[in-house]
Amino acid sequence: MKKIFTRPESLNDIPFHYCPGCTHGIAHRLVAEVIDEMDIYERALGIAPVGCSVFIFNYLNIDMYQAAHGRAPAVGTGVKRVLPDRLVFTYQGDGDAAAIGTGELVHAAARGEKITVIFINNAIYAMTGGQMAPTTLLGQKTTTTPYGRDKDVNGLPVKVCEMLAPLDGTAYLARVSLHNPKHIAMAKKAIRKAFDVQMRGDGFTLVEILSACPTNWGLSPLEALKWLEENMISYYPLGEYKTPAEEVQL
Amino acid sequence: MAKVLMKGNEALGEGAVRAGCRYFFGYPITPQSELPHYLAKRMPQVGGVYLQSESETAAANMVYGAAGAGARVMTSSSGPGITLMQEGLSYLAGAELPCVVVNMIRGGPGLGNIAPAQSDYLQAVKGGGHGDYRLIVLAPASVQEIIDLMQDAFDLADKYRNPVMLLADGILGQMMEPVELSEEVLVQAPEKAWAATGRKKGGPRRLINSLYIVPEECEKHNIELAQKYAVIAKEEQRWEEYQLDNAKLVIVAFGTCARICKAVVDRARQEGLAVGLIRPISVWPFPNDVFARVRETAEQFLSVEMNMGQMVEDVRLAVEGRKPVHFYGRVGGMIPVARDVLAEVKKLYNGGAV
Ligand SMILES: Cc1ncc(C[n+]2csc(CCOP(=O)(O)OP(=O)(O)O)c2C)c(N)n1
Ligand code: SF4
């Protein structure tokens, strides 16, 4: 019998702790598949955040670092400067990368630090109980915006790809979504491209992944994917926001 | 061996390079800026990396990444910047990562001023960041000692997998003195099997981590750290003693203060007063051993500091209430004057009568 689907080598055979319908698991899997396909696990170094995905360091079968809230791009900078031939990536939520760690994110990008940020935008702080994130949509109810996010009170949502695109240090920026298989395949392509661009030494790379948090959104797994598709994509348009002048060979 | 004239801040940089440090991440602040200036020039000459970070918070976390990757790495700052580094220091200690951090203390609290002070003593030796951890803290008193202690600092950091702080005040950074430079150390850091540099085929996965979500595991981690700190506390006490023989009054001072107090001891001895000095070189671990000995014979102690009385608490602990411990301090960038300290010594010596 021909095997057409199997666990990536770079993903450990242990159960995820994520809620049913959480897309963190899919994002982890995509990262692991790309590392396998690039045959690079001996040279891949990941940096785990705080937030729901902190345990990515248990799931990926590679050497990993756990960083303070938001500081992963600074940690990645330290790692990459010592080991310039390694693939160094951070995996960060929106609270991590777009709130407490904005300084580290923007400056790693501005320096053209040769690392990749996998940025999970689920429009919420999940682990701490569903508070507003910088990426929470206007009108979206969270535990700290019980009446819905109001721009006059809470400010406007942050668009990370658009924010980083004008910086000369960024080499590849893309926003993808995990709401259906077609888009999951596109997300994987973007991760592969970001890693290839990094290894070529072009500069800073980031893949923003629109993700579902059924638990904190108070929706079923299927409703959550639908909510993502119908509400998030219009505010956070998908696509490549920055690509290198010269295309990478996949 | 060549004798050269060097500024303290530059000596910190040269000492680090000679100790095999090849990575520096930092952010400007007075009065330590000559150190980054020096390393920005020097690191590229030895194939190292100098990187100016966007903040002290980032610098400490860059150090975390570089240390986790197995490098000899350092950062430096002063008061307000060290405060921002505390987050990183707690994580570095929690993940047991070796590195060296320089605090060239200025006047505080808040923005204070850029004049020399010793007012970050408690922050350095009692924690500063969150959680149950310790830094090894070394306090040089001369430019030569800066160079020598820098080698020790990196060696101790690697030996115990723990951050080491060099604690000095602005005067030491600015002071120029002749120093003897040993042969340049060309070796990089020792082999670090625990460093996360990429999983070898069939080899174990390496984690640089301070997260222990299960309370039992977190307790175990804290107990193991405490056991390590207990070994350091026993094995790594460093101090200089000066004229302690039959001293009735013992001055305790570190860094620049100790230099001034040496002159005080000399003058007091000339006047026939049995006064001696203990200069802690390691302020954590505090040199309790010498106090255990001296507290039997001395009649009283005087802690002289450039703060409102921080180390005096450790002196009291070391003396265990057996003898009176007094305090004399100047703050805000004011430096104790030998004449004034001598007057204080005489007052105490004569039972408080002037
Ligand atoms: C300095 C600091 N402040 C606050 C926290 C608490 N905290 C843990 S996770 C988190 C939010 C994470 O949200 P996000 O990055 O969006 O990840 P998600 O949980 O949504 O996956 C916060 C605030 C922390 N760990 N450290
Ligand atoms: S709380 Fe949300 S982000 Fe966290 S595991 Fe559950 S679904 Fe995923």
Image (spheres, coloured by chain):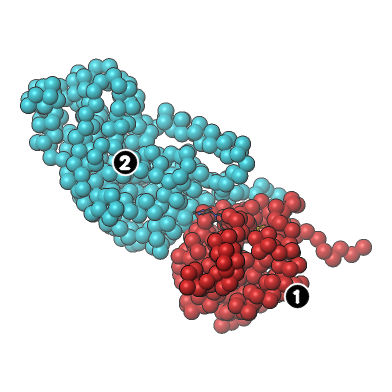
Chain colours: A red, B cyan
Residue located 84% across and 66% down the image: A4
**In the image, which disc is placed on residue A182?**
1
Q: Secondary structure at mark 2?
A: helix
User: Percent from the top left, x then y, of residue B57?
Assistant: 42, 57
User: Could you tell me which chain the residue with mark 2 belongs to?
Assistant: B
Residue located 82% across and 64% down the image: A5
Dividing the image into 4 quarters, which one contains the N terminus of chain B? top left
- In the depicted structure, whether residue B199 falls above or below residue B328: below
Taking the image as shown, residue B25 lies to the left or right of residue A190, namely: left
Q: Nearer the viewer, residue B167 or B112?
A: B112
Q: What amino acid is labelled 1 in the image?
A: Lys
Task: Name the residue that disc number 2 marks.
Answer: B121
- In the depicted structure, whether residue B51 falls above or below residue B293: below
Whether discs 2 and 1 lie on one chain: the answer is no
Q: CA distance from mark 2 to mark 1?
A: 59 Å
> Count the marks: how many?
2
User: Percent from the top left, x then y, of residue B212?
Assistant: 59, 44
Tags 2 and 1 touching, CB below 8 Å: no
Residue located 48% across and 79% down the image: A166
Q: Nearer the viewer, residue B45 or B26?
A: B26
Q: Nearer the viewer, residue A15 or B167?
A: A15
Q: Residue furthest front?
A: A147
User: Percent from the top left, x then y, of residue B180?
Assistant: 26, 44
- In the depicted structure, whether residue B314 falls above or below residue A30: above
Q: What amino acid is labelled 2 in the image?
A: Tyr
Q: Residues within 10 Å of mark 1 (few under 14, many from 20)?
A: few
Q: Nearer the viewer, residue B157 or B95?
A: B95
